[in-house]
Image (tube, grey):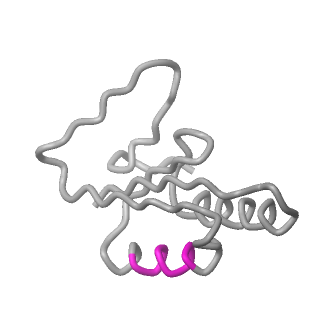
Amino acid sequence: MLVLICYDVSTETKAGRRRLRRVARVCESTGQRVQKSVFECQLDVAKFEALERELLAEIDPSMDCLRLYRIPGTRGFEVVEHGMFKAVDFDGPLVL
């Protein structure tokens, strides 16, 4: 399934800036950044649940916001892109 991760981490304190770096690092290791605090990932259910647990361990729910959108399957939705963003084709061949 396609997963869209959006977050807003308070950076008013040193601890907040540290949380922001940690959340971004987790997201970068899992998916593709499409905006500063927005990532797209292709995950199965088990990986989604593991990612959710990992992100929840990093944020402070009293100060930060984390939204995870699960978009099941490829039928019934369409991603329309405008501008110069170059997306990675997750279903295409992997060239190393």
Q: Is residue 45 magenta?
A: no
Foreground: 14 or 79? 14
| Residue 6 in the image, given as x and y percentages of width and height | 50, 53
Residue depicted at 46% across the width and 36% down the height: 87
Q: Which residues are magenta?
A: 49-56
Examine the rendered structure and indicate whether residue 46 appears above or below residue 24.
below
> Residue most toward the top?
83
Foreground: 28 or 66? 66
| Residue 88 in the image, given as x and y percentages of width and height | 46, 41
Circle count: 0
Magenta stretch, main secondary structure class: helix
Judged left or right of residue 25, residue 49 is left
| Residue 66 in the image, given as x and y percentages of width and height | 51, 62
Residue depicted at 12% across the width and 44% down the height: 76
Residue depicted at 30% across the width and 60% down the height: 70
Res 63 → quadrant: bottom right
Foreground: 26 or 67? 67
> Residue most toward the right?
14
> Residue most toward the left?
76
Res 1 → quadrant: bottom left
Judged left or right of residue 56, residue 16 is right
Residue depicted at 58% across the width and 72% down the height: 61
Examine the rendered structure and indicate whether residue 58 appears above or below residue 41.
below
Q: Is residue 51 magenta?
A: yes
Examine the rendered structure and indicate whether residue 4 appears above or below residue 60.
above
| Residue 36 in the image, given as x and y percentages of width and height | 62, 42
